[in-house]
Amino acid sequence: MGITNQEYFLLFLSSYLLVGLLTPLMRRIAIATDVVDKPNTAHKSHKQPVPYLGGVAIIIGIILISYSTSLVSNFTVDTFWLATSVLAPALVLGLIGLWDDMKNLPPLPRFVAQTIAGVFTAVLLVATENVGNPTGSEIFDTIITIVWVVGICNSINFFDNLDGGAAGTVAVSSIALAILALSGDQFLIAALSTVTAGATLGFLIWNKSPARIYMGDAGALFLGVLLATLTIRLNPDTKTQIGSYFTPVFLLAVPILDTTVAVLSRIKRHISPFQGGQDHLSHRLIRAGLSRRKAAVSLWTLSALFAAVAILISQVREMVEIWLITGSALLWILLFVLFFRSKDA
């Protein structure tokens, strides 16, 4: 059963307002309980402690709006279990991220938890035939899904290194994902993407530069698993198979670019990829002379550009689709080269 445009707007508005109202409350709780990001390592650029727990507001907002909607809809049972299959792994990772925000866990437990979430999601999606771009091999589908979930989970977490950078980019990706899902009558994906867009924009009110609160690992890991699961479930209406494979990549092209540049830069310098550093896209833009606010807007703009391509390739003729994919892939490679060759720190 479909959802009307008015209902999508209400989903967006409800999550936007709820998270926008919850975030300052979480900020006060974080300050009272000393759950803050202290500038106690070299790679942190803020001068004063900044409260965490913004991610908790995002998690509560998305889950509350999603389940409230399923309970009052005409397709309660189906929607409830479908939503749970997406939200449950994200919630588990979000809670582990919250533990990390409070106790500062080492990388290994987080990676193990991400892998478990990836395996659970892969087995569930493959078993229920809900992989949007199946390869025809259950083994390949499972492996690709695990790698995608773990990879995107880390990408969003790594990308959360600039005031408003991750929140704005996730909002852009979610809006594009909602448009694609809506055009293909994939209502669950469209609804959850709409809720996610509203929630991240509601949080952005408080997270834009200068940030008054961070989403922390709780929010980043939750959003990472959520976006990874929704994009892997998406079945794009492209003319070519390669277009369907590139669609989720373009939706998350900028976080993937950021992670690729940072990880390869650290490997080149013989340091751990999981070690924090001033080598992300945002840091390189700031060293090039941009303000923190302009750096965030630049990343949002790049995300919007690639997201627009993801939408366009499902609307054009096959030859145009191929040219768009080729041009966008070459642009991504050019950006990688330019950022990778810029000063690391």
Image: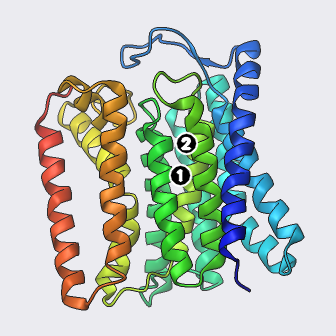
User: Which residue is painted at 31% across and 78% down in the image?
Assistant: 313
Instruction: Look at label 1 and name its amino acid.
Output: Gly
- Left or right placement of residue 97 versus residue 139 in this view: right
Q: Quadrant of residue 279?
A: top left
Q: Secondary structure at mark 1?
A: helix
User: Which residue is painted at 24% across and 32% down in the image?
Assistant: 285
Q: Which mark is residue 280?
A: none
User: Which residue is painted at 66% across and 44% down in the image?
Assistant: 94
Place of residue 212 in the rendered image (x, y in percent of width and height, measured from the top left): 57, 21
Q: Secondary structure at mark 2?
A: helix
- Looking at the image, the residue that sits furthest to the front is 6
C-beta proximity under 8 Å, tags 2 and 1: yes
Place of residue 74 in the rendered image (x, y in percent of width and height, measured from the top left): 86, 80
Is residue 246 placed above or below 52 in the rendered structure?
A: below
Q: Which quadrant holds the N terminus?
A: bottom right
What residue does disc 1 label? 224
- Number of numbered discs visible in the structure rendering: 2
Q: Relative to the observer, which residue lies in front, 127 or 299?
A: 299
- Left or right placement of residue 55 versus residue 49 in this view: right
Answer whether residue 215 is visible to the viewer in this image: no
The colour scheme applied to this rendered structure is rainbow
User: Which residue is painted at 20% across and 57% down in the image?
Assistant: 332
What residue does disc 2 label? 220
Q: Quadrant of residue 243?
A: bottom left
Instruction: Look at label 2 and name its amino acid.
Output: Ala
Answer whether residue 243 is visible to the viewer in this image: yes
Is residue 91 placed above or below 31 in the rendered structure?
A: below
Place of residue 164 in the rendered image (x, y in percent of width and height, measured from the top left): 47, 35
Place of residue 295 in the rendered image (x, y in percent of width and height, measured from the top left): 31, 33
